[in-house]
Each structure stands twice: as C-alpha cells, then as structure tokens.
Image: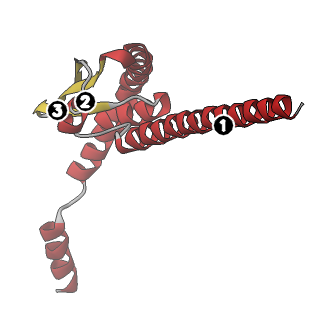
Amino acid sequence: MIIFQEQIDREAIALSLKASKLTATTVARAMKSIINKIKKNHEDEKTPHGKQSVKKLMNHNCPTNTIPIEGDKGLFEKIARKWNVDYAFHKTGRNKYLLLFKTGQADAITAAFSEYSSKIMKRAQRNPVKEAIQQAEQQVERTRPNHRERNRAREVARE
C-alpha cells in the first residue's frame, strides 16, 4: 500500500509540474501577444494621419495616387479631415496642386472629392453676386475723390 501511495504522490507531483510548465508557457505566450499588440499600437500612433508632407506620406510604405486640384485647397482640407483620410499636397503652380493620397483610401477620397466638387460648384454659382458687389465697390471708388483732391478742396474752402 505504501508503494501504491508513493506512486500516486509521484504522479501528482509530475502532473503539477506539467501543469505549472503549461501555465508558464501559456502566460509567456499571452505576455508576448500583449507586447506585440502594444508595439503595434505604438507604431500606429507614430504614423501621422490627416494632412502631412509628401515625404511622410511616402514613408507609409503603401501605394499612392494623385488628383490635380485647382483653387482653394483649404476647403478640401476641411472636408478631408471630416472623412479622416491621409493626404498631402504638392504645389505645381499658382493655385494648382497635386493631391497625393493612399490607394487604400480611394473610396474615402472619392467621397471627399465629390463633396469638395459640389461645394466648389455652389461657390461658382454665387460668384456673380460677389462680382456685382466688387464692381459696385470699384464704381464707388472711382467716383470718390482721392486723398489729394480732398486736401485741395479743404485748402480752397479755407481760403
């Protein structure tokens, strides 16, 4: 009976050692996966998002596309922030830019660009009113005497 009890004790000890090893390896694997997730999140936080320089956008190591834009790039920036896209501008001329963006975000850029286009069209429809206001201001400036003429009129009135 003593031999049988010793055998049971040995098996229990062997089982507890195996269980402790299994637990240690499981804990080690879990810790390793947690560390990998933390590293990935840390790297993702380092990666810039939104508007950035062309160099930073190219460092994302993903393919990019371009769209030419003329005019107000500030309006597009406001819309792009809303759609949460990564993009960069490269100036090609006066009020002419190339919009660079990640190929993977093409759907979001398409949606943002369509919204941008509709806003530009709305602004274009309002331009005749702006032009009429500017022409009226120019006419008022033409009819208003300039500084020298006002001073001469004051001097003549004093004399």
Residue in the foreground of this view, choosing between 27 and 88: 27
Is 60 on the left or on the right of 20, as rendered?
Answer: left
Disc 3 residue type (three-letter): His
Residue with the mark numbered 3: 90
Residue with the mark numbered 1: 17
Spatial separation of the CA atoms under disc 1 and disc 2 = 73 Å
* Labelled pair 1, 2 in contact (Cβ < 8 Å): no
Disc 1 residue type (three-letter): Leu
Residue in the foreground of this view, choosing between 47 and 128: 47
Spatial separation of the CA atoms under disc 1 and disc 3 = 64 Å
Which circle's residue, 1 or 3, is located before the other in the chain? 1
What is the quadrant of the C terminus in the image? bottom left
Residue in the foreground of this view, choosing between 48 and 71: 48
Q: Position of residue 118 (x, y in %)?
A: 43, 18
Residue in the foreground of this view, choosing between 13 and 101: 13
Crowding at dot 2, Cα within 10 Å, few <14 / some 14-19 / many 20+, comes out as few
Q: Secondary structure at mark 3?
A: strand
Residue with the mark numbered 2: 71
The residue drawn where x is 45% and y is 31% is: 84
The residue drawn where x is 41% and y is 30% is: 80
Which residue is outermost to the right? Answer: 1
Q: Position of residue 89 (x, y in %)?
A: 22, 33
Crowding at dot 3, Cα within 10 Å, few <14 / some 14-19 / many 20+, comes out as some
* Labelled pair 2, 3 in contact (Cβ < 8 Å): no
Which residue is outermost to the bottom? Answer: 159
Which circle's residue, 2 or 3, is located before the other in the chain? 2
